[in-house]
Amino acid sequence: MHYERPIHQPVGWVHSLCTQGGGGVSGKSPRCVLYNSASPSSGPSRVVSTRSSTRDHDLARDIAQQLELRAATRRVGPRVMQQTDSDVLGAAPAIAARSLRAVKVGVSLLTLVPGEIGGAETYARGLARGLAEAGRLDYTAFVPPVASGAGEGLPEVLVSEYRRAHSVPERALAMAAAALRPGPLRRRYEGVEIVHYPLTIAVPTLRLPSVVTVHDLQHLDLPHLFGRSERLFRRRAHEGSARRAEAVIVPSQFVRRSVVEHLGLPPDRVHAIPHGIDHERFRPGPEQREPFLLYPGRPWPHKNHARLFEALTLLRRERPQLELVLTGGGHEGRAVPPGVRVEGQVTPEELVSLYRRAACLVFPSLYEGFGQPPLEAMACGCPVAASRAAAIPEAVGDAAALFDPADAEDMAAVVSAVLESPERFVRAGLERASGFTWAETARRHEQVYRSIR
């Protein structure tokens, strides 16, 4: 059936009118009609069943009732679907068959560049793993040539037509090429009924119901950190993808408020679903704590490394043996003060070891849509001192010590207090992290997919 993109207006209810055989108008056979209550005067929006047997009529009526129950979460377009009596005669059994089987959901990961897009990659892989383990719908992951295996256990389609990208500039070129020649990419998605873009940008665009994950709107909340061209790109690619989607998923209530305010989307289209934690990987181990602070993160402006370096200088006056370990790409060639050790890109196993050995995770970021590293550290039994900014307090709750990220003295004082009494934060952190699982994240995503069937 050809999919007509729905109007983005909530439909309060769908009226079902079924005339009974012999008792209908002029004694005609049973006929069941669904009306769009948003515009009753426009007439019926879809003919479900006509001139059928009693059995087919009952089935059509049951389907109409199911649709009425789902009307709060489904948007019905106002245009009448034209069907002949013979076309509709077999429609009810077909609709019933679709309602009984699993919907085919495509998880589009074409814009993934391994190791280059930070927490968005962690989320995309964690979600795929959760859907593979706990999902009940029919999922397929569409992955680029450079990220085979990113489906994390989901059935995969490696889209060889998508341009290879190993860096952020190459990623931009690949997306531009996909926009100019989308046809070969679109053919790969044949059979998919709903598409989800976990990495925000809708590549390729498809005439399907879509779900888009918006990780943050930093370019609107902190525009001074972005150049004009980057703001323009995000306005078109990020904001445009979100506005065209039937549903938007965000990782926190902080981002949900931002999306509703900045993009003007109806609140019922924006769903806050926290990320999960891989507890098989991130868990306490036998390692002993060592005198170093840990900060995993690329040196992007909002990560606030300069203020952390100032706080480290203050801390080393009382604790000269204390070091700061930095992980993540992009630090190469950058000047760092005494006591800072750059590890750069590390393997997942190495990161777990650092979490288990660090005296404290320090997270001074000025802006986060969620805050994954503090929760991963907590799951490993590492005490956390974190910024009181954006979505970070929402993620860590009362399990971390919070500081003003603009004040190096406050940062140093809070970190020093955690180093003096880490046990309370270790216990609180383990309890806090236990509430975040990818299985639960996947389950809540699946609820969103089902709501737009």
Image (cartoon, rainbow, N blue to C red):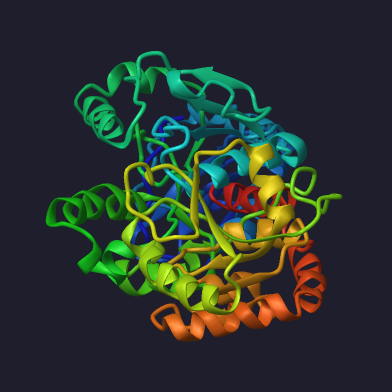
Q: Please say if 372 is above or below 160.
A: below
Which image quadrant: the C terminus? top right
Q: Is residue 400 left or right of residue 309?
A: right
Residue 130 to residue 336: above or below: above
Residue at (42, 32) in percent of width and height: 113
Look at 36% across and 33% down and name the residue there: 206
Could you say where residue 140 lies in the image, as x and y percent from the top left? Answer: 58, 27
- Residue lying at 22% horizontally and 59% vertically, measured from the top left: 226
Whether residue 58 is situated above or below residue 317 in the rendered picture: above
Image position of 203 (left or right of 73):
left
Residue at position x 65%, y 53% from top?
447
Horizontal and vertical percent position of residue 169 = 25, 34
Q: Nearer the viewer, residue 192 or 365?
A: 365
Task: Residue at the far right: name it.
Answer: 286
Work out whether residue 5 can be spotted: yes
Tell how many labels: 0
278 displayed left or right of 9: right
Drawn side of residue 169 relative to residue 402, left or right: left
